[in-house]
Image (cartoon, rainbow, N blue to C red):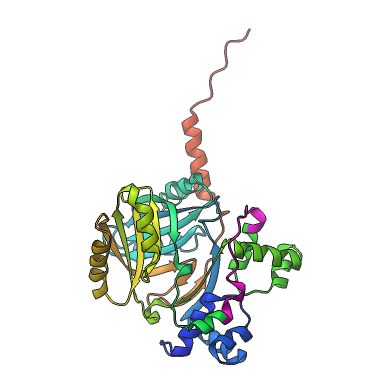
Amino acid sequence: MPDALDELDYLLITALQHAPRADWRRIGAALDVDATTAARRWARLTESGLAWLGCHPNPALIGELIVAFIEVDCASGELHQVCERILDDPPLFNIEHTTGARDLLLTGVFRSQAQLARYVGFRLGGLDGIAATRTQLATALHTEGSRWRLDRLAEESRGVLRADRDRPAEGAVLGRTDLDLILLLSQDCRQSVARLAERSGLSPTTVRRRLDRLDAARAISYRCEAARSVSGWPVSATLWGTAPAADTARITAQLSGMRETRLCATLSGPYNLMVTVWLRSLADVQSFEAALAQRFPELTVADRAMTLWQLKHAGEVLDPEGRHLRRVPFTDRWDDEEAGAAERELLGRLRGPAPASGPPA
């Protein structure tokens, strides 16, 4: 298959963005093709690496998870070696080689601030080739890439797919079993309920009921992605800015609704806003920033970076053209033996020597 998408490919990707677990008969009905054609076309796209499906827990709705953005400076000539060493680290959601004031921008999802500190201080801090790191926490994640759509489908076709995706959100307390089920699903988000039941040890009825509840709570973030080089949106830019605290809720709400926005977060660091956008050309970068200045005069863009190569995107390993190579399953149960040993050794030194026992009575 050539490295290009035709209109049916775009429609198929859009359909799966709207209904990632819909059966091929319903996908075909939305596209006015038969189920076999839809399934065969999807197989061709995935085999070529031009499109793929995945899912992951939604950190915004699972309170025990935190999101961190880690900037990495690499020693000269060591960038790709560093990337290769950290590529399979499960907490790392994204690894981007960028322009500007950092070599790499990492997005990580962690169980706690202690786990994040262990990762940055002892995992990254112990690697040859890393010269410096800077870390910021997302205090709120307003939108992320799973909500982004190619928007190629007519409203009538979207209606065919909408039946199982438009339930009202429900309040839910998500426990360990829920998170474990999402992590199993993330290994293949189209696997059957029967297969999930077999792997989880739950009954099929329980799995189906939990999936319905997790979908209703928006706790599962599904993604159907196309290689950025053929998506029609080949340029990725990240902007950091500052805005008055009283204005951030309004600004982030409007930023999150913009067509170009893939991610919008408020941060703990010197810049309190971060937004990642996909654009149609490099020339659009300046015009997008100018439009921001006109729309939000109280927002100051303080820094910007272009993504040269997104080596890891939502846990998927990509080539320089954005084609899919393989998946690194996410887990919040990361524990690195060397990092843990280094932390324990430091704690031992911090405790100091054991107090001397007093003289015998």
Check the picture and name the quadrant holding the C terminus.
top right
Residue at position x 46%, y 56% in the image: 108
Percent across and percent down for residue 294 are 23, 63
Q: Nearer the viewer, residue 69 or 242?
A: 242
* Residue 70 visible, this orientation: no
User: Is 162 a magenta residue?
Assistant: yes
Q: From this view, report whether residue 119 is shown above or below residue 254.
A: above
Percent across and percent down for residue 34 are 60, 92
Percent across and percent down for residue 328 are 53, 66
Horizontally, residue 121 falls left or right of residue 293, namely right
Region rendered in magenta: 160-178
Percent across and percent down for residue 138 are 42, 52
Q: Nearer the viewer, residue 192 or 337?
A: 192
Horizontally, residue 289 falls left or right of residue 42, namely left
Residue at position x 26%, y 54% in the image: 298
Q: Nearer the viewer, residue 207 or 347?
A: 207
